[in-house]
Amino acid sequence: MNGVMKRRLIIVVLVVAVLLGLLVGWHLIGLHFMKQALTHNAQPPQTVTTLLAGSSDWQPEIAAVGSVRAVHGVNITTEIAGLVRSVNFRSGEDAKEGQTLVQLNADTDVGTLHSLQAAADLAATVYARDKVQFDAQAISQAQLDADAADLRNKRAQATAQAATVAKKSLRAPFDGRLGITTVNPGQYLNTGDKVVSLQSLDPVYVDFRLPQQQLPQVKAGLTVRLSADAFPTQSFTGKVTAIDPSVDTASRNFQAEATVANPGHELMPGMFARVAVASGDVQRHLTLPQTAITYNPYGSTVFLVVKDAAGKATAQQTFVTTGSTRGDQVAILTGIKEGDEVVTSGQLKLKNGTPLDISTAATPRNDVNPAPQEH
């Protein structure tokens, strides 16, 4: 009986040992296949562009929008009514100060002027003759005084008529460019009718408004950089020349005026312009393209490129503190140091430890003064 029990016990132990061996073997085989699967399914490298973080001089600027205004601009109108005899300019031409633009018919006025001048000459002759007679005591002082008053009256009438004749010639009050006119010879113009506009184009004023909080930062003499949508690749420079002494009670903004050189006459009155006022001393900041920054509710982050001993590059996310912006660039106050390699595009598909394939194609723009690009 004891021998049978021993054999049965040995059989049970062997069966249990075999089952345990099978179980351990199955588990090892599963781990082996799982390891192979993980090896084959490893995350492939992600293609990104990078840039070495570097410092640059940074001029603090205050941005605003404004409009261009001529230093001298006027609509030339008639002061008195008359018939147009000649138009002595073409639309769009440049005019010089004093140039006759339109001549009205002044024949009647010129005739009246000649008559009054003749009367004034006669009064001068009478006064001279009576003065000789007064010296000889042939006439009274009252007669001589009457002759002098008549002479002054006649000369005043001739001067007034000469001014009327001059008003029949419409002249340019300053140098500038003429606009488009619809006035033609033979047309009758009433008092106050517009003949043509005249605008001086070099230099020009730029009017812009800023919040009252920035009033201490803006003063006359500061450099202004101007850009216009009509000339996206050009930049114009000028100086702040005046600041309005009052603040608008509705918007709490104050108005400033800048004078901008315009030798090529590209800027025209009424044109929309973007204004950047250089405010404060030049500073030095660590800068990155704005595309490198990922803005989140919990903070701004960038991905750094970390390389191991074998040169394999992986991504490492880090928080940064951003400052002001200019063009395509943003100032980095804390979080990275100069020389760090930062991912500038493709970071949306990254996480910590993601292998990287660094590309130089399609590098994001990093321009201080970007302009629209046509592709």
Image (cartoon, helix red, strand yellow):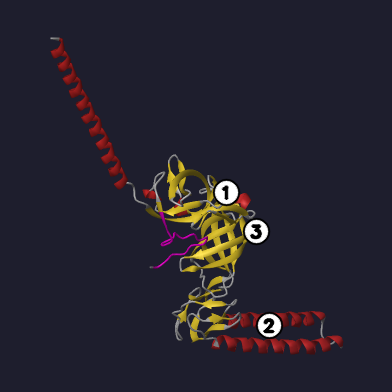
Earlier along the polypeptide chain: callout 1 or callout 3?
1
Earlier along the polypeptide chain: callout 2 or callout 1?
2
Q: Secondary structure at mark 2?
A: helix
Report the side of 304 relative to 125 (left or right): left
Q: Which of the 4 image quadrants contains residue 282?
A: bottom right
Spatial separation of the CA atoms under disc 2 and disc 3: 53 Å
Q: Which residue bears the numbered disc 2?
A: 154
Report the side of 188 relative to 71 (left or right): left
Q: Which residue bears the numbered disc 3?
A: 220
Spatial separation of the CA atoms under disc 1 and disc 3: 16 Å
Q: Residue at x 22, y 24 (%)?
A: 17
Q: Which residue bears the numbered disc 1?
A: 212
Looking at the picture, how far across and down is residue 227, in whole percent? 51, 64
351 up-or-down from 202: above or below: above
- Image quarter (top left, top right, bottom left or bottom right) of the C terminus: bottom left
229 up-or-down from 352: above or below: below
Q: Which residues are magenta?
A: 357-374
Q: Is residue 275 magenta?
A: no
Looking at the picture, how far across and down is residue 215, in whole percent? 60, 50
Spatial separation of the CA atoms under disc 2 and disc 1: 60 Å
Q: Secondary structure at mark 1?
A: helix
- Image quarter (top left, top right, bottom left or bottom right) of the N terminus: top left
